[in-house]
Image (cartoon, rainbow, N blue to C red):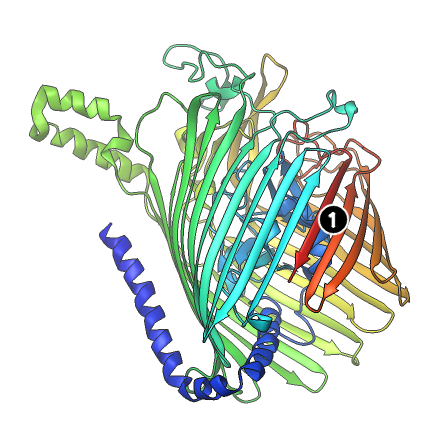
Amino acid sequence: MTNKRVRISVVISVSVATLFSIAANSETSQEEASSASNEKKLSSSSEIERILVTYSGIGQRNSGPATPMNILSGDELAHRRQGTLGETLEGLPGIHMDNFGGGASRPVIRGQTVPRIEILSDGAELFDASSASPDHAVTTDPLLLDAIEIVRGPVATLYGGSAMNGAINLIDSKIPKAFPENGATGAAELRYGVGDEEKSFAARSTVSLGQFAFHAEGATRDAENYNVPSDFGSDELADSFSENSSFSVGSSWITDKGYIGLAYTRQEAEYGLPGHSHEGGICHTHGLDLHCEEHNQYNNPFEGLDNSHTAYIDLRSERIDIRGDYDDLLPGFTHTRLRFSHTDYGHDEIDGDTLFSNYGNNAYEGRIELTHVPLLGFIGTFGIQYTESTFTGLNRTDPTDNRELLEYITENVGIFLSEQRSIGAFDLEMAIRQDWRKVTVPFNMYAAQSPEYWDFLIDLFGEDGIQMDIDNARTRHEDTYLPRKSNPFSASIAGTWNFDDDYSAALSLSRSQRSPSVRELYAQGNNLATNSLEGGLLRANTFSSEFPVYDDIIETANTINLTFRKKTGPTQFEIGLYSQDIDDYIFANLVEEETLESGALFRYLIYTPADVRFTGIDGQISHQIDSETLLTIFGDYVRTEMKDVNDNLPRISPGRLGARYDRNWGLLSASLEYYRTFDQDRVASYETETAGYNMVNVTLSYSVKRAEGQDLEFYIRGTNLTNELALAHTSFVKDQSPLRGRNLVLGARMKF
């Protein structure tokens, strides 16, 4: 508790100091603003646009980043929105999802998902448990997002090793960055989905008072099990329901040079886990052998439960954000950017009335970026980032186990520097980042043994008489959970040649390093979500001494990206080619599998390093046929190779090719999209091939202009109109959780 108070005090102190500094630098501007508020509001509106594109931490040059980038916003975002982030982004070039029913789906960029892509909330890390298991949701509500920025390719020099394959930045309005027009703005949206009886509502409002702006927003969504094609064997997917709600309140102090603000966000969700089964709960190891029957001390922890019960996750997350962007705050620096956050995340995994697992993530983050004045022709940003997270719940799937949860504490300090310079038609960018990372697992006597065990010993020997037992337990724990330190280093250099105002070509070379995640290090036991028993890099040797202890593994990726762009004129395109060699890539390696009574396969997997290569291409080409008609061709393909192992990596996204036709008749617009996801036959030894599928989506919208600044739109979006059975090869549960069948979403949204 004391450490927590200290951390909160530091955040508040830095924020207050920044406020006073801003105040000292903005007295004159405030006086001028009081007599010219309309001019101030106009400049603030243009300022927020500049902040979004220039200071979001992803795209930083007018010529665009050296790696491919998508910005999903406006009508396109509103029409594509689904209940999860993965479903919302599915279908964009280079982006797939690993589907887990209606409540959890993580985005997959160029064949990789978390923890190799970073998901950010306006430039700050988004802390939850999604990197620990595919049934854990990404804690965001797409209904409340203004824009989503996606970079396909390494940005580890900005955000550390978790961004070694890309980043997704979620832009919202919970901390106002500009004054609302005419002193107040608002928006609302209402949706109904036919295929899952979705009922959604979202609303937001921003008002200004003097130098302050205040914002409130909220959303609620309730969806039943979604429909699937009858070829699956039923008309709906059991336990694919999802219910969630979220709200935020925030305020900021705004001047003509920037803003600083604070927001509180709370999110709750309850969603089902399709295809859940307790059948593998008894599975255990005897050395290299997997055994899935009761005997001796191995008892079924799910005795008395059957698979007819609904399994679901009950999630809650609270988050406090402090954000600031300010020009000319410090001598020698043109811009200062602040991001501080505290997240208190937790979820329970419940089967019927039985709580069989629960996870938590209590995290603090602070990030400061300083953009310096031009120096020898270079403009650059220096930054420092500190994160501390306490993760709980790993390896706990026994509902009869009443021991306290072990805490896995990760501390990370990172410093980074990026520099840019234009030399004629050539743009040069260089960046480096150094991190110092430490993972510790503190001893807890009530996690080592149950409270009843210690109470029994105290009754026999007294509190002083059990000190030797406690010391022995502590020694065993410290021998087992050694602190894990690593110092990943990342660097990149990129050049963009602007042939003219239209065409450019960019070459990016990067070296990115990533430390293993907590799960990759310490997994030891059953993961019923993936029907597997897993052993981590530091814990697999508890199953068998033949498994080595990998205590010094750091993934190292050497990546080449080549990006071609044409950004003006009737025909525009962005195409990215890449090759990524990764040393010590950590993957789940099959040791053995056993067929359960139901016919399902249960796998014995060990996290293992291997040298691999990813190569691929993705992008899109669009052509403006006339002022009302746009045609777009898009696609992606990734191929992997394991250099020293005669196998393929699991769950690699298949190739995809599609086209979209957009037509606008003024108030009425339409979009027709078709894409083919091809077969995936390059599979790991324990996978099955996945058949390809066709996807047809249509959107119709009609806008009504009620008054200046007041818009009303009605829309209908149909997805998978041919009702084709589609399985996502990237999913851990592809055979138990197919994609949605035919669905129609009817919506109305307004802004004022």
* Looking at the image, residue 515 lies above or below residue 530: below
Q: Quadrant of residue 45?
A: bottom right
Q: Quadrant of residue 569?
A: bottom right
Query: Residue 605, position in %: x, y?
Result: 53, 31
Locate the C terminus and report the quarter of the image it occupies. Answer: bottom right
Front residue of 112/581: it is: 112
Q: Amino acid at mark 1?
A: Gly
Q: Quadrant of residue 740?
A: top right
Please tell me which residue is depicted at 39% across the width and 51% down the height of the picture: 363
Q: Relative to residue 254, is residue 243 drawn left or right?
A: right
Please tell me which residue is depicted at 78% across the width and 71% down the height of the picture: 567
Please tell me which residue is depicted at 55% across the width and 21% down the height of the picture: 277
Query: Residue 640, position in %: x, y?
Result: 69, 46
Query: Residue 291, position in %: x, y?
Result: 49, 17
Neighbour tally class for label 1: few under 14, some 14-19, many 20 plus, Cα within 10 Å: many
* Looking at the image, residue 295 lies above or below residue 109: above
Q: Relative to residue 578, is residue 470 drawn left or right?
A: left
Which secondary structure lies at badge 1?
Answer: loop
Q: Relative to residue 352, is residue 739 drawn left or right?
A: right
Residue 134 visible in rendering: no
* Looking at the image, residue 563 lies above or below residue 392: below
- The residue tagged 1 is 91
* Looking at the image, residue 391 lies above or below residue 508: above
* Residue most extreme to the front: 707
Residue 170 visible in rendering: yes
Query: Residue 546, position in %: x, y?
Result: 45, 31
Front residue of 470/181: it is: 181
Front residue of 686/256: it is: 256
